[in-house]
Structures are given as structure tokens and as C-alpha cells.
Amino acid sequence: MKPRTKFLLGGVLVLGTAGYLAASAIRDTGIYYLTPGELSAKTRADPTFYETGVKVGARVVNGSIVRDPGGRQVSFKVTDGAQTYPVVYRGITPDTFTDDVDVVLEGRLGRDGTFRATTLLAKCASRYENAPEKYKNTPGYKQATPPPADRDQRA
Amino acid sequence: MILVGELSLWVALLMAAWGATVSFAGGQMRRADLIESGERAIYATLAMVVLASIGLWTALLTHDFSIKYVASFTSSNLPVVYTIAAFWGGQSGSLLFWALILAIFSAITLWSNRASNRELMPYVSGTLALVLVFFLATICLGTNPFERLDWIPPDGRGLNPQLQNPGMAIHPPNLYFGYISTTIPFAFAIAALLTRRLDAEWLAAVRRWTLFSWFFLTVGITLGMWWAYVELGWGGYWVWDPVENASLLPWLVITAFLHSIMVQEKRGMLRKWNVSLVIAAFLLSIFGTFITRSGVISSVHSFAQSKVGWWFAGFLVVCLGLAIYLVTTRLKDLRAQAELESMVSREAAFLYNNLILIGIAFSVLWGTVFPILSEAVRGEKISVGPPFFNTVNVPLGLALLLLTGIGPLIAWRRASVANLKRQFTAPVLAAVVIGALLFVLGVRNFAALLSYTFGALVLTTIVQEFSKGVGARHRMYGESRLIALPRLVARNRRRYGGYIVHFGIVVIFAAFAGMAFKKEYDLTLKPGESRAVTDPWGHTWTFLSQGISRYTVLNREVTAIALDLRRDGERAGVLTSEKRQHVDSRGAPTFEPSTEVGIKGSFGQDVYVVLAGVRNVDEAEIRVSFNPLVRWVWMGGALMAIGGLVVMWPAADRRRVQSGYAAVLRPEHLPSGEREFARI
């Protein structure tokens, strides 16, 4: 066999391994990212979706957060409007976790209809950029006087 | 000044457009006057962009909150250094920064090539001008940093506290330098393809720029890891976040290129491959920017979702189409001048190194875009996280580490058994000893075990190379070994600088593997209460809460915990961790609370304490992590950067051009030396 053929075989082997690893890893580690509504549709259609690891993006129901005194457990409800699930989570909650925030949960939906989360991320609307327009509705921030016509002088 | 800045942006756009037009026209018609006008247009663009940047900096420093960008990212109580850094803290400012740096690099390129590569230069400056046109048009029409509000807020919103960190002031510029400098090799590649002058000439011109790019990407990525580690407070430094991946992709491709370019220099092979890698590095930089700006992939780094992302997507598609067209129509000009002679040769080792690097790049790219692809194709959102990337990249990374040891020692063209024996006896012995030792000591994590075994192999090869070189100088010139070492490196910077980079790689792999032994505890402590936990090295640590304190400082309200540490009963100092609520100059809270991590570092491990929350007034919830060998990540990154600097140092480069490119080997005994070697 010529070295070139050998190398091509080796190359196919290397890239094939990489491709196989990538494909199988997606299958083994990729998990569904669903809204509560989609999750309930999935479980109705296919009961194996109970007790299967999924990611759920939803909003925390106002006033539903109950912290277990002394322990680390916190229970709350999440919803997307179509479906509401009770959630239990053990662990430290992020600073941003409050009523009405969007959260991303990773965990399993039990057959009792309770979602057991193993990770909890609270999303801030936007992390790095936010227009100051947001101030406009804040009390105390009145609409400023219209910009002076002679602004160019400051330039 | 602000108005001048705004206007000069538009002038810059016109200048760049003029430069692109006349450069290409001048190249086609071979008219020196047009070519010169094109180059001057780029210098003029630079001057205009500099003016625009001064304008934005003026607006920032004079706190002109009528400008949306200033109001969005600064406040009157923001420290000056961050006010300056806010230039690249947001979308439109960072694009202007990009244009500024690109204009500077373009001008440097034109200036340094004013007497060389004259056939290529019209097309190089034309391509550079086109890229400048794209960025300036995006800024002027898509997201103008000088956009005004129709009202004047009393104060700005302030800079996100997580960005108020010294690392953050320097991390983005480093990455930008890395990304932007891929444009220069790209322009040379396009010029070489257009003119069909695809010999070693254009490669020689771009090698320094790819090194430059590699250096800044390395530094930028390392700083980014450091920033994430000390600032974000989740106890790690890499999560395979899309934006992290976006910075890794061009790094991988450039690393591959820096190896395969040697094969082309020595053997005239891999010409298509090299041209493709240079183009891919640029496209991946643009792709990274697209990911960061468009919000199509959710990421901790996301700028607000904006249409600007789609400008980048469009630009990416156009560049990709153009590159594919150019490469495919010039396949004949890119034929290899030699063929692979043996599988046991340095060429073969480099080829495999390239394949693995590109394999890693593809899998990272695949994992990054899979969620969007899956949603678009199957309508299902699938989340791909760190488990995916680790499953794929741990084996590939280990194979790469092994090749790091093999590649530099094996002979070009065809290695003999004697060569192999001489070079590999000591390294293999060292690897086996280290591997066995760790196994006996109880290390059972397979990936970590292999990391250390291969690391020992690579390290021994490096030591062996250095000691051989030093020994030879010692014998030949009678130099003492202490003098011989720096002289050895100075005389052959490319080779020994490369070994220093490899050393850095080994150190980083060792550090990555260390994280497999991380331990984490969640503790709730009242003042005076203490808890004992065990670290990965088997020591017992006691954490005693000294209580919570609350105070206001500068632009933030702080809640802090102080912990007394004891290691195996002996005092080990105090650690504090803070929760910060940033406020504007009127005392109103801005941004979400942020965390200030307490870290007690040593070479063995970092004790990493995060105040997660306070309950019932004085009960602190803390998370304690013992992160083994984290310090070695920063040291490895520094070593790689130092190695990169050694390779880049100009003197070595000039000598190499004189000696290295004179001879392109063309083996006579091959039946058809011109036959193309590999279609990859």
C-alpha cells in the first residue's frame, strides 16, 4: 500500500471517529429543551418522557416560591400559560431567582406531575445591554427637556 | 468633537469604498496611480476612524448622556478606566473598535509591504478595504454609536458590574486583536487566489500575522477563562458556552495552520489545505461575531438580540461563496509538489495533528449550532451542553497531546528505526513510570491518567530536545550550559519557541485533568458556627463564619461574609466573599446583584468560596469548592503566550525567510513529483 493510501485510510479513521463521537454524544447527552406545554404534550403522547432528563424553560408563577426553613429545598410553580408544573429543587438558588422571572430547569418530570429539578438557572432579560428607555417609566425620571438646539456647540 | 467623530464615520465609509474600487481596478488594469490611490484611501480611512473613535471616547469621558451608547454603558460614578473600556463594552462601540483595529492593521500591512509583494498588494488592499466597508456600513447604517436619544437621562445606566473587572478591560481587546488579525492573511489568500500567485510568497507574508493572531487569541481565551473563574462564581473556567466556542474555533484552525505551513515550506505539500485554513480562520472569526451579536444561540455573553447579527450572517455567506468559488477554480494552481513518502514521518504526524485539530473544530462547531439546526430541521429544540463537548473532545484532545510528543521528534520524509529508538526511549520510559506511579497512588480516572502519562511523554521529549541542543553548543563552542540555553533559543526561535508552547499545552492539560478531582460543598453557617470538609488531597478544612457585614462603598452596596479557615487544625487565613448590589449616583439599584468570589490559591488547589445568599438576617449560604490545579491553567496560558512571543520575535523571522524559503524540496525519485498528494 502506498503511504498516501495509508494516510487517507488513517484520515478517514480519525475523522470517522470524530464524527461518530459527535453523533453518538448528541444522542447520549443532547436533551430536549421544552416549554411546560410541550412537555405535557410529549408525556401524553409518549409516557417514557416521564422520568427522562429534559430542560424546561418557563416563568416562575408569582407568589409560588416556598422555601423549606432550615433546609435547602425550595418549591415553586412554573408556567408557560398553557401548562403549570410544581417544581422542587434542592440547592442554592441564584440571586436572580424571584417571582416572575424566566428560569431554565434541568431535571425530570415525575409520574406524580412534579418536576424535580437538578439545576436551576434564572435568566435576566438581557445581560450586557439594556436601553436606558427603561428609565422612562420609572418614577422620579421625568422626561427631560427637549435636547437643546445648539447641541453642536458641545461637540 | 463628537459631531466630528460622527461625520468622520461616514467619510471613512466613503474612503474605504473608494479604496476597494480603485485597488481592484488598479490591479486589473495595472495602473500604478490607481493602486497608489487605493492604498492612500486606506490610510485616509484609518485617519477618519481614529477621529470617530476619539469622538466616542470624548462622549464617554464627558458623560454626554444624550448619546444612547454613553447612557447605556456608563454612569457618572463609573471609574475612569471602565469608562474608557466601555468603548468596547457594548454592541456599536465594539464594532467601531473593530473597525479601528482593522484600519490600523490594514495600514501596517500596506506600510510594511510598500516595497514587497507588489503583485499581490492591490488585491490585498482591495480585500481589506472591502472588509472595512462592511464594518463601517454596519456601524453607520445598522448600529451607530453616536445615535442620540430624544431626551437626556440624568445619569447613565452604568456598566454591568461583571464587566467591572481589570480582566474585562483587557480580555475583549485581546480577542478582537486575534479575530481581526485573521483578516490580513485572508486578504493575502484572496489576493494570491485572484492573481494565481500561489507559491510560497504569500505564505511568507502572512505567517507573522497568523502567529500574531494566534498569540492574541491565546491570551484572550486565557484571560476570558480567568475572568469567568473569578467573576462569574460558578467555580469553573470553561463551560463550552457558544461564545467561548466561537473564540476557540479560529484558534484551533490557526493552530492547525501553523503546523501545516511547515509541511508546505519543507515539502511543498498541503497547498490547498493551507489556503483553506487561512480562509476558514477568517470566516470563523466572523461567525463568532455573528453568534455573539445575533442572539440566535443563547449564551451568557449575548449582546441584546439585534439585526446586526444578520448583517454578519450575510457577509459570512458572501465571503464563504467567494472563497469556495476561488479555491475550486484554482485547484490546478494548488497542486502539491511532493508526495507523502512514509507514514512514519514528520509530515504524517503533522497531517494527523491537522486532522485532529480540524476534527475538534468541527465537533465544537457542530455542538454549537446543533440546537439551531435541530430546531430548524426537525422543529425540536435540543440542548447540547458540556457533556457533549467533553465526550467528544477528551479522546481527541488526548490523541492530540500524544502527537505533540511524537511530531517534533520524528524525522522528515521517512523515519528510521534507529531514529525512533534514539528519540523515544527516554520519553516512553518516563510516561510508563508516571502512569504506573499514579495508578499505584490510586488515580483511577482513565482520562486523567492518560493525560498525565502523555504529558510526561511530551515533557520528556521537550527536556530531551533542550538538553541535546544545549549539550551540542556546550561541546562545539565551549559555552557554559547557562549561556548556551538562551543562545540556543535565540538562534532557532521558531523551533524552541514551539517547544515552549508545547510545554504550556502539557501544563494546561494537566490542569484540565485536575478538575476531574474537584470537590464541592454547600454549607449554611450562622455566625460562630463551623463546618469541616475534606479536600481532594485528603486534608480537612474547617470553615468558621465570622458573621455577615453590610456596608456601602463607591458605587455599590456590599454584603460580605468572612470565614476563618483551618487546614488540618492549623490556621490557614481568612477568606471573604461578597454579594454586591450596584447603584447609580442617586442610590437606585442597577443591574442584578453580583458575586465577588473568595479564592485562596496555591499550586495544589484553589479554595473557592461563594456567598450564595443570606437567610434569616445572619445565616450565610456558602458554596465551597476545592478546585485542583487551577493555577496551572493560567501558567500554561502564560507559557504558551511566551512561546508564541519567542517564535514571533522579528529577528528570527527575517533569518528564516532568507534561509527557509530558498529551497522547496522536490524529490527526484518520485514518478510524478507534481502529483497532488491529498484531497482534504
Image: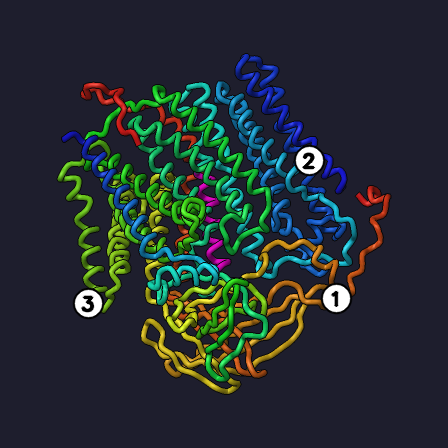
Give the alpha-carbon distance from disc 3 to disc 2, as whole Å: 66 Å
Identify the residue at horizontal 19%, vertical 51% (top origin): B428
Q: Which mark is residue B9?
A: 2
Return the disc, 1 or 3, that comes first in the chain's sequence.
Answer: 3
Of helix, strand and loop, which one carries label 3? helix
Q: Which mark is residue B198?
A: none
Q: Are marks 1 and 3 on the same chain?
A: yes
Residue B208 lies left or right of residue B2; in this view the side is left
Q: Amino acid at mark 2?
A: Leu
Q: Is residue B221 magenta?
A: yes
Q: Which mark is residue B586?
A: 1
* Residue B515, visible in the rendered structure: no
Identify the residue at horizontal 84%, vertical 50% (top origin): A146
- The residue carrying mark 3 is B440
Residues in magenta, as a range = B211-228
Of helix, strand and loop, which one carries label 2? helix
**Residue B357, picture quadrant:** top left
The C terminus of chain B lies in which quarter of the figure? top left
Above or below for B520 versus B416: below
Q: Main secondary structure of the magenta part?
A: helix
Callout 3–callout 2 Cβ contact below 8 Å: no
Q: Amino acid at mark 1?
A: Arg
Give the alpha-carbon distance from disc 1 to disc 3, as whole Å: 62 Å
Identify the residue at horizontal 18%, vertical 34% (top origin): A6
Tell me the crowding category of disc 1: few under 14, some 14 to 19, or many 20 or more residues within 10 angstroms, Cα based: few
Tell me the crowding category of disc 2: few under 14, some 14 to 19, or many 20 or more residues within 10 angstroms, Cα based: many
Residue A150 lies left or right of residue B24; in this view the side is right
Return the disc, 1 or 2, that comes first in the chain's sequence.
Answer: 2
Callout 1–callout 3 Cβ contact below 8 Å: no
Q: Please give the chain letter of the residue carrying mark 1.
A: B
